[in-house]
């Protein structure tokens, strides 16, 4: 068992981190894969939020737009981090119990070993959850092209002029329609998945948006990887719990000692 002291500023006493031994589990397991579904759900929720609130995030004021979108990315990463930390702390606690059972001579089933803490398990879970989104980005990234202006429909009052030989051909050019292809559908989905990054470069920056689309397989993983970082912190959170329990016991012993001393003191005065 490792004991570390965590210093704090001010007059408060330093907190104690007590790391108890645990049984290390598997970094890849069915349980970790199932947890990846939770990561995928969070990403899907973010896509829906970006779809409905995207206009509020695409402001014309550059500094305010960047501030809002960085805050959105930070909150999304914090969501993944906190969820990973919760799972990591729970797995560490379970791994401590599993080690105790193993030391007692019991056989640890595979499902219990899958539940035990492993430092890399959180990153595996995050990769499983984000893999469908990365796959879509990988398909679209080679198709990405700079955004170009497309012609719109002519107003109704210009239709009689289409029959005129002198200007009809020129006006017909404006009625050309570009078919909606797979790349267009993927562009819409990918941009929603990395919408904060699109806003950071700005809608009036075609070259910047092109680079965002090309690097979308990496950008879409930015926030979910915080799950793995949070999961690794689960070991420390568990040590803080043990430190808090130990601190509570020490305080209880001091209070009992003071109470006994207060009972004996009147007798000594007599």
Image (spheres, rainbow, N blue to C red):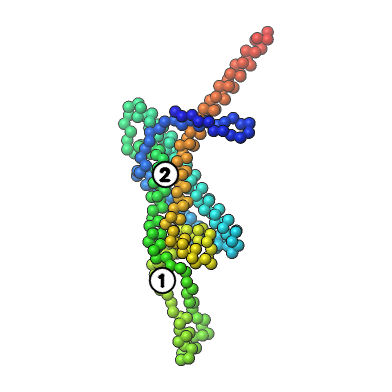
Residue 7 position in % (x across, y down): 56, 33
Quadrant of the snapshot with the C terminus: top right
Q: Is residue 149 above or below residue 45?
A: below
Label 2 Cα neighbours within 10 Å, binned few <14 / some 14-19 / many ≥20? many
Badge 2 is on which residue? 122
Check disc 1 and report its element: helix, strand or loop: loop
Q: Is residue 109 above or below residue 206?
A: above
Quadrant of the snapshot with the N terminus: top left
Residue 46 position in % (x across, y down): 48, 55
In three-dimensional space, the C-alpha distance between marks 2 and 1, rounded to whole angstroms, equals 39 Å
Q: Using the image as rendered, state which of residue 149 and residue 114 is in the foreground.
A: 149
Residue 180's label in the rendered image is 1
Q: Using the image as rendered, state which of residue 205 and residue 35 is in the foreground.
A: 205
Most extreme residue toward the top, as rendered?
A: 270
- Specify the quadrant of the image occupied by residue 142: bottom left
Query: What residue is rendered at 61% in x and 16% in y?
Result: 261
- Specify the quadrant of the image occupied by residue 107: top left
Query: What residue is rendered at 45% in x and 55% in y?
Result: 219
Mark closer to the observer (2, 1): 2
Check disc 2 and report its element: helix, strand or loop: helix
Q: Is residue 151 above or below residue 18?
A: below
Residue 141 position in % (x across, y down): 40, 62
Q: Indicate left or right for 147 with 11 as reference.
A: left
Label 1 Cα neighbours within 10 Å, binned few <14 / some 14-19 / many ≥20? few
Evaluate whether residue 53 shows in this view.
Answer: no
Most extreme residue toward the bottom, as rendered?
A: 165
Evaluate whether residue 70 shows in this view.
Answer: yes
């Amino acid at each position: 068992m490792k004991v570390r002291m965590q210093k704090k500023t001010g007059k408060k006493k330093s907190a104690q981190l007590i790391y108890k031994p645990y049984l290390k589990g598997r970094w890849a397991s069915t349980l970790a894969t199932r947890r990846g579904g939770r990561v995928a759900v969070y990403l899907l929720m973010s896509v829906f939020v970006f779809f409905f609130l995207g206009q509020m995030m695409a402001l014309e004021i550059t500094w305010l737009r960047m501030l809002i979108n960085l805050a959105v990315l930070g909150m999304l990463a914090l969501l993944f981090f906190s969820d990973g930390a919760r799972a990591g702390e729970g797995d560490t606690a379970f791994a401590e119990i599993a080690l105790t059972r193993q030391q007692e001579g019991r056989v640890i089933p595979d499902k219990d070993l899958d539940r035990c803490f492993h430092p890399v398990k959180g990153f595996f879970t995050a990769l499983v959850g984000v893999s469908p989104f990365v796959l879509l980005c990988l398909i679209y990234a080679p198709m990405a092209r700079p955004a170009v202006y497309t012609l719109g429909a002519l107003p109704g009052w210009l239709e009689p002029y289409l029959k005129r030989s002198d200007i009809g051909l020129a006006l017909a050019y404006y009625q050309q329609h570009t078919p909606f292809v797979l790349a267009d559908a993927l562009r819409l989905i990918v941009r929603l998945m990395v919408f904060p990054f699109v806003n950071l470069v700005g809608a009036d920056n075609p070259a910047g948006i092109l680079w965002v689309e090309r690097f979308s397989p990496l950008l879409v993983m930015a926030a979910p990887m915080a799950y793995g970082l949070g999961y690794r912190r689960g070991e420390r959170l568990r040590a803080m719990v043990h430190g808090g329990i130990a601190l509570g016991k020490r305080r209880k012993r001091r209070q009992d000692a003071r109470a006994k001393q207060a009972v004996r003191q009147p007798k000594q005065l007599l």
